[in-house]
Amino acid sequence: MRRFLLIGGLVLLLAAPAHARSGQSPGSGSLTGGAGGVDGACVGSKVTLRDDLGGSGMTANSPTSVVIGATAGRYTCATMRMPCTASGYTKISFSISVGLAGSVGEVGIFDSTGATRITSTGSKSEAAAGNSDTTGLAPFTLTGGTQYLVCHASSAAATVSIFSMNAGSPFNNAIATSALVSGAGATQVAPFNEACTANVTPYTCCTGLGTGTCLGMADRTGIQGVTASTTAGPLVVIGP
C-alpha cells in the first residue's frame, strides 16, 4: 500500500501543468510565480499578479492583447488578490504586444479603492513590442489574501496594446466587477510629457509640444473617477 501511494503521488506531480510549477516573465512560457499561500511569504523570485477570479475563465499561460482606451493617460485596471505576502520586492515586468514610436506608458499597483499608489514603474518606452522590465524600485510589500488594483496608462491613444488576462466567457461575464478604468478628464488621467500638444495642453504640467514636467502616475494622489470597465488591466510579474 505504501508503494502504491508513493507511485500515485509521483504520477500526480508529473501530470501537473508546467505553469503550476514554475514562474517566468510576461513574455515567455508560464506566468505562475511561486507562492507560499495567503498566510505565508512568497516563494521564488517571481509572482504573477492575476485577475481576482481565481483562474475562472482565463488561462494563466495564454495572455491576450488588449488595446488601450481612446484617451491618453487613462488608467485601465484589474483587481487582483495576492496569493502570498511579497516583502521588499523591487521589480515589475509587463509586456507590450503592439508599440508606437514616441509613446511611453506606466504600470502601477494601487490599493483596492485606487486611492493609494503602492508602487509604479515610472514612464517607460512603449515604442516597440516586447517585455518592459523595471528594477530598482523602492521596496514595496503586497499582503497575501489582500485585493489590489493593477493598472496601466499610456501617452498614446488607441494604438498601443499590452498583454492582459485571457478573456474567456466566464471572465467576460464577471468582468464588470474585476476590471476598472479611471475618468477621462485632464485631472483624472496620468499625465505624460509625450501627450502634451502645447503649453498647459492638455495638462497644466505641459510646457509645449511633447515637453513639460509631467510625472505620469506620480502626478496623481490615486486613481481619479474609478468606474467599472470591459477592458482588463495588465498582466504583471513582480520580483524581489
Image (cartoon, grey):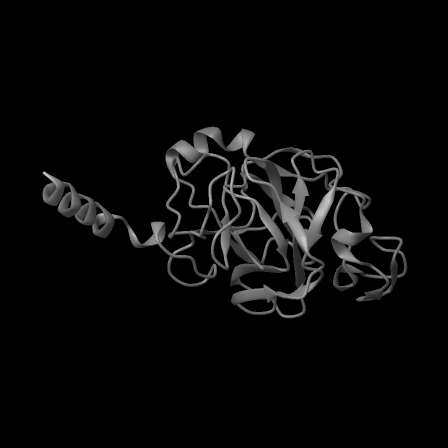
Q: Is residue 21 left or right of residue 50?
A: left
Numbered-mark total: 0
User: What residue sits 82% from the left and 59% below the top?
Assistant: 214
229 relative to 12, above or below: above
* Quadrant for the N terminus in the image: top left
Q: Is there any visible trace of residue 22 in the rendered image?
A: yes
Q: Is residue 70 shown to the viewer in this render? A: no
User: Where does residue 192 sit, x and y in percent of width and height?
Assistant: 76, 59
The image quarter containing residue 222 is top right
Q: Quadrant of the C terminus?
A: bottom right
Is residue 1 left or right of 51 when viewed as pictured? Answer: left
In this rendering, the answer to whether 88 lies above or below 82 is: below
Residue 70 sits above or below residue 26 on the image: above
Image spot of residue 209 (x, y percent): 82, 66
Q: Residue at x 51, y 49 (%)?
A: 42
Q: Is residue 200 left or right of residue 72?
A: right
| Position above or below: 154 against 220 | below
Q: Nearer the viewer, residue 4 or 139?
A: 4
Q: Position of residue 35 (x, y in %)?
A: 46, 47
